Image (cartoon, rainbow, N blue to C red):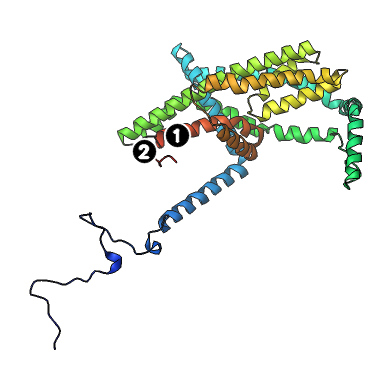
Amino acid sequence: MGARTPPCGRDIVRVLPSERLISGNGEGAPLPDSHSELPPIIRRTEFVAYALAGLLLIAVIGVLYFAKAFFLPVVMAVVAGTMLSPAAGFLERRGVPRALGAVLIVTAVTTVVAFVVALIAVPAMEWSSRLPELGAQLKEKLHVFDRPLALWKELQTMVGGSEGLPSLPLPKAEWVQPTLEFLSPTFAEFLLFFATLILFIASWRDLRRALIMNFGDRDARLRTLRILNEIEVHLGNYLLTVTVINIGVGVATGIICAITGMPNPAGLGALAAALNFIPIIGPVAMFVVLALIGLIALPTIGGGLMAALAFGGITFLEGHFITPTIIGRRLSLNALAVFIALAFWTWLWGPMGAFLSSPLLIVGLILKEHLLPEDSPQLPQA
């Protein structure tokens, strides 16, 4: 018997089990028989894109790390210039040419910074020259802990531990020069910073216009304008607000040091104001400095720790209530994001990177808000 032939004009299509259609769907889609036939969550093209983005990020970080001598002064000047641009605009509206206003602003800021550094440097150099003597005084003051340490040694011996605690040598004078070399930029970096800062403030308006007009689309131009305006406003407000708060912290610290009998209260207040620009690390370092100076300069341990404890209370109130209340209204910063940014930029660029961590985090959040708005598709809440 021969094979049956389909009627004329009709084709018989055999449907495989893996190509069955979902009922109720007019167009339909193949229904896979098992999970092994489901499409992958991340396709190969997406994986390649993520890998290339990761390699680009690693390359950028490597360039910023090894070319620190160039990028750190330039980025510092751009961030500081963006913060000071509103002041240059204010002077320009009062009839002062923008180039002259840039020079005046940079001169004024440099004078204030030099005054603060002078308040800090004079006692710091005096104390650094007396390190052996001060170390001996500190060791003598800490003899009160000899009995608790002896009991701890006996307890370690009873439980079979080491026979004693290793002695902790006090720092010597040799650490001062490497530390100053690490904290102090070279003359070329200073020159690059000041030249870039003055030129950036003087030409910021033209740079804004050129950056905005670089986009051909009207919507892109408006978005760029909004981003630049918001960055300038937020960084200017951040600098003004943080400076006022830190001056208040410095004044309060100086008053506390004067009341508790600490030496050079003006210099310690200036140091507290300067270190408070560095989140987390600055207040902790200032607490340690006040504790060491108090233990050395004052006769009793309780009196020596009084200024450090009072400073800890001030920074607790400032960090948990005052600063979040004022800055949080303008731009909320997540504590974890602040800590990670601080750790990353400190590792990358040292103390100056720590100072730049919060402004750069603010810039990143502004870019994220405008380039990835909240009305874009989001993941469902867990």
Which numbered disc, 1 or 2, marks the residue that appears first in the sequence?
A: 1
Q: In the rendered image, which residue does mark 1 sit on?
A: 367
Identity of the amino acid at label 2? Answer: Ser
Q: Nearer the viewer, residue 66 or 16?
A: 16
Q: Position of residue 283 (x, y in %)?
A: 68, 25
- Residue 310, percent across and down? 73, 18
User: Spatial distance from mark 1 to mark 2, Cα to Cα?
Assistant: 15 Å
Left-right relation of 339 to 216 = right
Type of the residue with mark 1? Leu
Residue beneath disc 2: 376
Query: Where the N terminus falls, by quadrant?
Result: bottom left
Which quarter of the picture shows residue 378?
Answer: top left
Q: Could you tell me which residue is drawn at 49 percent across and 21 percent down? A: 329
Image quadrant in which the C terminus is located? top left
Q: How many marks?
A: 2
Q: Quadrant of residue 79?
A: top right
